Image (tube, grey):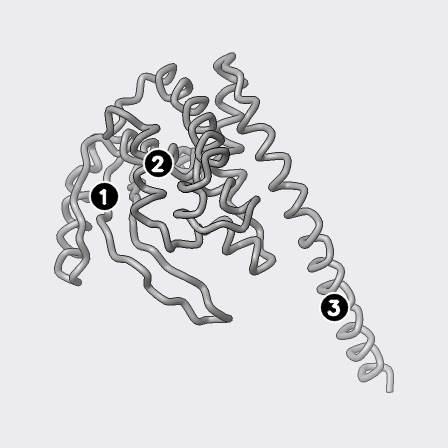
Amino acid sequence: GTEERVAAELNTTRVLRATTCMGALRVGPGIVYATGCGLTEIGSRYPENYAYVLELTEMLRKCGFDVRPSENIEGVVWTKTLVNCGINPVGALTGFKNGEVYKDPQLRGLVIQLVKEAVEIVKALGIELTTEDPVRYALGTAKATGDNINSMLQDILAGKRTEIDSITGEIIRLGKELGIDTPTNESVYALIKAIESKYLANSEAITDRKSLKVKELVDSLTTS
């Protein structure tokens, strides 16, 4: 959905899309550790942009990145989305690293159900994934990245807004449009949003109090 929104907002189809498997861990304000450097794939749903795809790919390769162009970027994006919709909310809700999610039979079952629901949407959209077995691929990713703290859990730990709307929320939205039930995704979405709303409300309250104090200080200086 992001590519379409950007194209509509800018009134152009010259929009590229990319996925990356680079891992990172936020350890403090402005401090991020690279935990893995994987493949980045670039493409566009608009065929006329492929020359730009190749140009950007070559530019990033010269900078030392592992990059390749994709003629099926929709499939690439959705394959990664299936992984994220399964692993990220489960890790975020439990506080578990990816490997801990994989090792727990009940959590592994939850990941499977989340992915299976999303796969039905992919089938309805007619998108060709880059894996023949998305469930096994998602579980394999969790196992292979066992020490990773997924990005959604990192956001919760940092008191930041998560990407639940752009991942699980998008799956739910498409499910409703296509008449496909996504009850498991809806449940984890509601739980993540409840956690989010609690700490975001506190954060906004603190920001409001700080803004009020600044305003009072400015008013006192301008009236004295």
Q: Is residue 31 left or right of residue 169?
A: left
Mark 2 and mark 3: span between their CA atoms? 46 Å
Name the secondary structure under disc 1. Answer: strand
Q: How many marks?
A: 3
Q: Amino acid at mark 3?
A: Ser
Q: Position of residue 130 (x, y in %)?
A: 23, 30
Kindly identify the amino acid type of the residue bearing the numbered disc 1.
Glu
The label shown at residue 125 is: none
Task: Determine the CA span between mark 1 and mark 3.
Answer: 42 Å
Between marks 2 and 3 in the image, the one whose residue lies nearer the viewer: 2
Left or right: residue 168 compared with residue 112: right
Q: Is residue 12 above or below residue 199?
A: above
Q: Quadrant of the C terminus?
A: bottom right
Q: Residue furthest top?
A: 179
Helix, strand or loop at mark 2: helix
Q: Residue at x 50, y 15 (%)?
A: 180
Residue denoted by label 3: 211
**Residue 25: horizontal and vertical position, in percent?**
41, 61
Q: Position of residue 200 (x, y in %)?
A: 67, 53
Q: Determine which of the numbered discs, if any, sits on residue 139 in the image.
A: 2
Q: Amino acid at mark 2?
A: Leu
Pointers 1 and 3 in contact (C-beta within 8 Å): no
Q: Residue furthest right?
A: 224
Residue 41: numbered disc: 1
In the figure, residue 189 lies in which quadrant?
top right
Q: In the rendered image, which quarter is residue 141 located in?
A: top left
Locate residue 115 relative to residue 207 in the image: left or right. left
- In the image, 157 versus 12, the foreground residue is 157
Q: Is residue 198 above or below residue 105?
A: below
Q: Residue at x 44, y 54 (%)?
A: 149
* Left or right of residue 92: residue 124: left
Query: Which badge, 1 or 3, comes first in the chain's sequence?
Result: 1
